Image: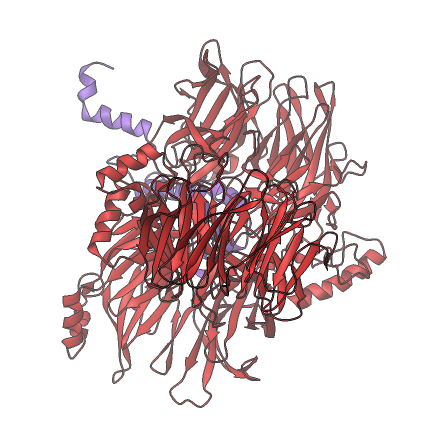
Chain colours: A purple, B red
């Protein structure tokens, strides 16, 4: 990297995007945005034990199973990505099950 | 509004647990097999992982904590001070539970040379641990082992002896799957087991080895290596356990399944523990159904693994962590419900194993499953448990039993371990003996024969005209050879000097020498002794008329009269402090008089019987006690803080008055008072954990004692007592003997340090909500469970199982409950395979069971239970009086039939049942059943009608998502939406129409709601915040004055919702999902506060401040404490009481510094803290 590049806004952005997962960019589509939000949500659920417990109660599963399920969901949190050209808006569905508490 | 938030009952759920030699574990099993919580610290953050490690050659373990702080913290347990000392704190990232900020996983090198801290995704950091010349722990700067687009499932350290440390991780790369619209890449995504090697020479971490692993992998367990075993890891995956190591073929075995498990369900290992001895190691893996399997490896000289064997060990409730203690115990921290300590009876080393790698069968459909039958505990024996309220599902505070203080009714637990727990503020006691006496005793003492004796020798009971002496031995029986005068009442009985006894009766003092000689001292003239104060060396008596006579023991063991003093009037009470260690006498005598004063007199020879100080009190004192309080956390011995002597006085108006006595001058200062009950408190000294404590007997008994360095005054849950004395025998080391009525009672005090004691009534399914039926004082509880069988079906399956086992078939197609009968054949009563221990058998996930229960809380008896049929489950309940008043109070229950969450929420139908109470409120009769479109999650009575919140479609689609709460007050309806906070509604009767006139601008995922006042509601959201929403006064007035009630504005439909917005006036992060809120007062005459209960089983209170001065004081004391309590929203107008209560645990210097900044003394601050706590509980 040349010295002048360091002050270039684009290279700074790139640096941020590389360092912090989920940093947005101008061409971000709705799917990418939703995927990121969902992954953040799942990571947050996993990190907060009481929330895991809350979900486990609602679904009548063990907390360990609930944690595993959330980890698994991080792979494709919003279903399959849309076709390249046809960027469809795949709506991220919130968890429905916690309603019953 | 300003609130003071205080946690009353700490969360009882365990997130993670480790054991190790912190010279002592934090949970230490004591000799009696009880678990004591040695230490607990409020961290004001979220702990996500814990690990312990030990440096090579060292004897002491350190604790590493992974939390939401973006820091790695290493702690050391300081035994002397009984606290954790922070050794290192390394910042590596932002705070908060973030996806790529490490803290979720922790792994340590088994030799304690390095620690890896990892995040859910991408980041992994390795710190090298070492020690410096002074043997202090040092830590390096972090080495990165990041990889983008990789999800991490588990991390562990590989045991590779003294080679370079290696960490193993289960990883999944998702970068391809995110880009491939066909789904092929996602289907092909493969988890990998990756070894990271830390090169200690180069100070560098590299990916050493990576190999595909079963896609169900979720947990890694280190296998002992070096000289002790083959090394490598056990990969626990769904249905399998696989041994893996670099350059070693996989050794795979299938995890046995319960026969009754639906085929669609996998078996997942949720917790693991390793046991290591010199020549032997094995693993205990617990599945999500609670079954523990013992895994052993057959290996050749610590090299190749030939066989992996899985043997069914035992079944205990599902845990979040298990620890095998070296002393042969297993600590199981349950996910929900009580934690338990088990003792190993055997280690299950029979040759019969359920599954093994050598018998693994692979068919076209995959690996052949193996089945097993759970059986009663064989290898483990439960010896103690730790109460846990987790999760609290619903809670109500009310004084149903008409006791002195209200009771807290909580619904706790889940599935078969559910219970209704009635909490009462106070300590639990366990009664050892009750015996009737001939007459009504007035007082009781215990006395030792010799100062060096461990146990008491006599119990002396005084009646109005006689004294009864009981000797303590194998049994307690009356004796007459004790030397005590039994024809007169006694005023005091005690040990004098080394080995002589003293009895004070109204006409004199009887001194019984060890050799049987008796010295009598008679009162002069017609005067009688009215009060006595004594310790081992000194005796002061008060004669009628107010004369004090002071005796002291001389060197020959004779009791000699030293001094007389005339008091202005009759003496109400007096006390001498115990002789301080290494001194001849105690310096102070406290005398209470009927003229509302307490005087401190000197007993020193120089100024004997001089009045040192006078304190006037609000009412004549009834009883006095000088108590030495070593209030400190400085250490077990209190070395850090000097002990201070407190003068405690029980006044006739029921107040306990405490004041500090200056050790030198005898001046009194720093007074505190607390109302204890309707009777004047009598004070007695007792022993608690080897320290002096105080029993106060008012209309209920209280105990003042020191717990974790803090003086606590807590009520005991016991009946009114007349007189008490400490009691010690070989059956009961620290007990209390007391008289009440005509009975003599011996009891011990349990679970010190707890705020509540509980009465447990078991329930059948996960309780959801409950209501109190007014007048009848019954509770109606609704319970529902998903994926379970009804009691009937379980009963039937049990029969089927009997037949099945008759023919010796185990794997038949029945999928019901075959466990309740296990080995118990005819032994139905014992039922060793209780559901409580084994859990209900799993049914398919869209199957529901539910029941409505009417319960009489006084007897704990269920008077009626209605099991709902046809896959219906109850979710809401309320009592209702319809305006036609035909049936009186009715019960409304909202149910859903065939509810399913995944793949999409669906249901066959929702119903509202209306029941009538029959049999004097003991039974229920169905009157009517209405079908509705959605799940009725909230029901409420409103103006003689029933309001039901049914999904989003409450009558006219006003509400965005799902209604989860409805409260009403006057003509307003406060509706809580599951995702969109509160909506304030009005109902127009003439048009039969509902309209929303105000709502919240913040999208809140409500979990609990409570109505506070006309304009205010309190709510809690899913992320652990409590907030108050209030309609601004001017808007509220405007709506009340508007004849249309703001309806016109509503019809305009601006502002994306209601025309008015509520303001959030209070914000606070609890850090735990709050499931219930209630406005209540926990003590009679105390201020009303907001009580909350949480998923993790904690109870807390928020008390509104009454003066601006207090707000200022506490906000200055709290200083800058924002980060954690503002995790989601900036904290507003709430003082964190838990933080303020850390003040007493600070060092004296720091306390003084803080106090100086506030222009106060530390004593004043402590008093203030105590006062505000006493306002709550």
> How many numbered callouts?
0
Query: Where's residue B569, x and y in %?
Result: 37, 62
Q: Residue at x 57, y 13 (%)?
A: B163
Query: Where's residue B990, x and y in %?
Result: 25, 85
Q: Quadrant location of residue B760?
A: bottom right
User: Could one spot residue B545 in this view of the protein?
Assistant: yes
Residue B83 located left or right of residue B787: left
Q: Residue at x 50, y 72 (%)?
A: B401
Q: Quadrant location of residue B321?
A: top right
Q: Residue furthest right?
A: B807
Q: Nearer the viewer, residue B481 or B1167?
A: B481
Q: Residue at x 25, y 83 (%)?
A: B991
Judge whether B893 appears above or below B295 on screen: below
Residue B572 located left or right of residue B232: left
Q: Nearer the viewer, residue B906 or B456?
A: B456
Q: Quadrant of the N terminus of chain A?
A: top left
Q: Nearer the viewer, residue B850 or B962?
A: B850
Q: Nearer the viewer, residue B752 or B878?
A: B752
Q: Residue furthest front?
A: B525
Judge whether B1083 appears above or below B276 on screen: below
Query: Where's residue B718, x and y in %?
Result: 54, 63
User: Could one spot residue B1177 in this view of the protein?
Assistant: no
Q: Quadrant location of residue B789?
A: bottom right
Query: Where's residue A46, x and y in %?
Result: 45, 42
Q: Residue at x 78, y 52 (%)?
A: B810
Q: Quadrant of the C terminus of chain A?
A: bottom left
């Amino acid at each position: 990297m040349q010295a002048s590049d360091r002050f270039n806004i684009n290279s700074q952005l790139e640096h941020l995007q590389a360092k912090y997962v989920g940093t947005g960019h101008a061409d971000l589509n709705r799917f990418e945005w939703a995927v990121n939000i969902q992954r953040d949500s799942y990571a947050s659920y996993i990190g907060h034990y009481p929330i895991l417990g809350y979900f486990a109660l609602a679904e009548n599963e063990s907390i360990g199973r609930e944690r595993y399920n959330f980890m698994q969901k991080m792979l494709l949190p919003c279903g399959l990505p849309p076709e390249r050209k046809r960027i469809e808006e795949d709506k991220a569905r919130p968890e429905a099950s916690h309603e019953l508490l | 509004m300003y609130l003071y938030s205080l946690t009353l009952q700490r969360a009882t759920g365990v997130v993670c647990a480790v054991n190790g030699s912190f010279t002592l574990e934090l949970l230490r099993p004591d000799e009696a097999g009880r678990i004591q919580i040695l230490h607990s610290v409020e961290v004001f953050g979220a702990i996500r992982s814990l690990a312990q490690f030990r440096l090579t050659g060292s004897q002491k373990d350190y604790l590493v904590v992974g939390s939401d702080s973006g820091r790695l913290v290493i702690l050391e347990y300081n035994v002397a001070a009984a606290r954790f000392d922070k050794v290192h704190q390394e910042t590596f990232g932002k705070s908060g539970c973030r996806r790529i900020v490490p803290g979720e996983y922790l792994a340590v090198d088994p030799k304690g040379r390095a620690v890896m801290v990892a995040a859910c995704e991408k980041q992994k950091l390795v710190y090298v641990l070492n020690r410096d010349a002074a043997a202090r722990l040092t830590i390096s700067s972090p080495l990165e082992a990041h990889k983008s687009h990789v999800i991490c499932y588990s991390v562990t350290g590989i045991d590779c002896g003294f080679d370079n440390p290696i960490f193993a991780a289960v990883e999944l790369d998702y970068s391809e799957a995110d880009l491939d619209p066909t789904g092929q890449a996602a289907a092909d995504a493969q988890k990998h087991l990756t070894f990271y090697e830390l090169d200690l020479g180069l100070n560098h971490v590299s990916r050493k080895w990576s190999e595909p692993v079963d896609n169900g992998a979720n947990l890694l367990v280190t296998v002992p290596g070096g000289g002790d075993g083959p090394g490598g890891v056990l990969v626990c995956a769904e249905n399998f356990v696989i041994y893996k190591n670099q350059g070693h073929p996989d050794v795979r075995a299938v995890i046995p399944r319960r026969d009754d498990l639906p085929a669609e369900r996998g078996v997942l290992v949720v917790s693991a523990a390793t046991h290591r001895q010199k020549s032997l190691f094995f693993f205990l893996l617990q599945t999500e159904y609670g079954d523990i399997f013992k895994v052993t490896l057959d290996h050749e000289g610590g090299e190749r693994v030939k066989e992996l064997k899985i043997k069914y060990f035992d079944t205990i409730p599902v845990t979040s962590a298990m620890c095998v203690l070296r002393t042969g115990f297993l600590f199981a921290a349950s996910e929900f419900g009580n934690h338990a300590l088990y003792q190993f009876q055997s280690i299950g080393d029979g040759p019969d194993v359920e599954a093994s790698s050598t018998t693994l069968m692979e068919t076209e459909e995959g690996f052949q499953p193996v089945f097993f039958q759970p059986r009663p505990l064989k290898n483990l024996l439960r010896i103690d448990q730790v109460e846990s309220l987790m999760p609290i599902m619903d809670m109500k505070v009310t004084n149903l039993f008409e006791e002195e203080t209200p009771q807290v009714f909580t619904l706790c637990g889940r599935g078969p371990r559910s219970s209704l727990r009635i909490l009462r503020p106070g300590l639990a006691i366990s009664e050892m003996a009750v015996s009737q006496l001939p007459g009504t005793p007035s007082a009781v003492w215990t006395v030792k024969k010799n100062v060096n004796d461990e146990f008491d020798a006599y119990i002396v009971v005084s009646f109005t005209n006689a004294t009864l002496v009981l000797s303590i031995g194998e049994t307690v029986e009356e004796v007459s050879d004790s030397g005590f005068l039994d024809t007169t009442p006694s005023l005091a009985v005690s040990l004098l000097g080394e080995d002589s006894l003293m009895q004070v009766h109204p006409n004199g003092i009887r001194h019984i020498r060890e050799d049987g000689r008796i010295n009598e001292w008679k009162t002069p003239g017609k005067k009688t002794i009215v009060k006595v104060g004594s310790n081992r060396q000194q005796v002061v008596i008060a004669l009628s008329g107010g004369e004090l006579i002071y005796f002291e023991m001389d060197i020959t063991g004779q009791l000699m009269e030293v001094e007389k003093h005339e008091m202005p009037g009759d003496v109400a009470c007096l006390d001498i402090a115990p002789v301080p260690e290494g001194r001849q006498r105690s310096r102070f005598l406290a005398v209470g008089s009927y003229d509302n004063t307490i005087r401190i007199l000197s007993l020193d020879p120089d100024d004997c019987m001089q009045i040192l100080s006078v304190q006037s009190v609000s009412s004549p004192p009834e009883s006095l006690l000088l108590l030495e309080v070593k209030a400190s956390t400085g250490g077990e011995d209190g070395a850090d803080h000097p002990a201070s002597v407190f003068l405690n006085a029980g006044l006739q108006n029921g107040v306990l008055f405490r004041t500090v006595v200056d050790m030198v001058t005898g001046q009194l200062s720093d007074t505190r008072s607390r109302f204890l009950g309707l009777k004047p408190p009598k004070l007695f000294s007792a022993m608690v954990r080897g320290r002096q404590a105080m029993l106060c007997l008012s209309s209920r008994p209280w105990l003042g004692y020191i717990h974790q360095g803090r003086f606590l005054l807590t009520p005991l849950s016991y009946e009114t007592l007349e007189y008490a004395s400490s009691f010690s025998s070989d059956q009961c080391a620290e007990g209390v003997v007391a008289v009440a009525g005509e009975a003599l009672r011996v009891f011990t005090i349990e679970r010190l340090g707890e705020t509540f004691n509980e009465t447990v009534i078991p329930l059948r399914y996960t309780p959801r909500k409950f209501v109190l039926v007014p007048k009848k004082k019954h509770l109606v509880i609704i319970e529902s469970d998903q994926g379970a069988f009804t009691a009937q079906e379980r009963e039937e399956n049990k029969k089927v199982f009997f037949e099945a086992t008759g023919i010796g078939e185990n794997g038949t197609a029945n999928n019901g409950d075959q466990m309740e009968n296990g080995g118990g054949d005819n032994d139905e009563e014992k039922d060793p395979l209780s559901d409580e221990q084994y859990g209900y058998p799993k049914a398919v996930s869209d199957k529901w069971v539910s029941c409505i229960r009417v319960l009489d809380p006084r007897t704990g008896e269920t008077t009626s239970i209605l099991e709902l049929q046809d896959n219906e489950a109850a979710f809401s309940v309320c009592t209702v009086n319809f305006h036609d008043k035909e049936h009186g109070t009715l019960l409304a229950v909202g149910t859903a039939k065939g509810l399913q969450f995944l793949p999409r929420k669906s249901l066959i139908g929702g119903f509202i049942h209306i029941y009538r109470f029959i049999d004097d409120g003991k039974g229920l009769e169905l009157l009517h059943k209405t079908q509705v479109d959605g799940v009725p999650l909230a029901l409420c009575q409103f103006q003689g009608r029933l309001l039901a919140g049914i999904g989003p479609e409450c009558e006219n689609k006003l509400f965005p998502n799902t209604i989860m709460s409805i409260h009403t007050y006057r003509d307003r309806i406060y509706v809580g939406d599951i995702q969109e906070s509160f909506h304030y509604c009005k109902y127009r009767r003439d048009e039969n129409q509902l309209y929303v006139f105000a709502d919240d601008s913040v999208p809140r995922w409500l979990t609990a709601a409570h109505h506070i006042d006309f304009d205010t509601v309190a709510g809690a959201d899913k992320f652990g915040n409590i907030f108050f929403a209030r309609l601004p006064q001017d808007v509220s007035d405007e709506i009340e004055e508007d004849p249309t009630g703001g309806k016109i504005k509503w019809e305009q439909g601006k502002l994306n919702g209601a025309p008015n917005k509520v303001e959030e006036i209070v914000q606070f992060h609890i850090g735990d999902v709050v499931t219930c809120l209630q406005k209540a007062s926990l003590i009679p005459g105390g201020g009303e506060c907001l009580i909350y209960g949480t998923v993790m089983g904690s109870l807390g209170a928020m008390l509104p401040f009454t003066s601006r001065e207090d707000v200022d004081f506490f906000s200055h004391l709290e200083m800058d404490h924002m980060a954690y309590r503002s995790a989601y929203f900036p904290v507003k107008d709430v003082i964190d009481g838990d933080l303020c209560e850390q003040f007493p645990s600070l060092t004296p210097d720091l306390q003084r510094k803080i106090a100086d900044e506030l222009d106060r003394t530390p004593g004043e601050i402590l008093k203030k803290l105590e006062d505000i706590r006493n306002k709550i509980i």
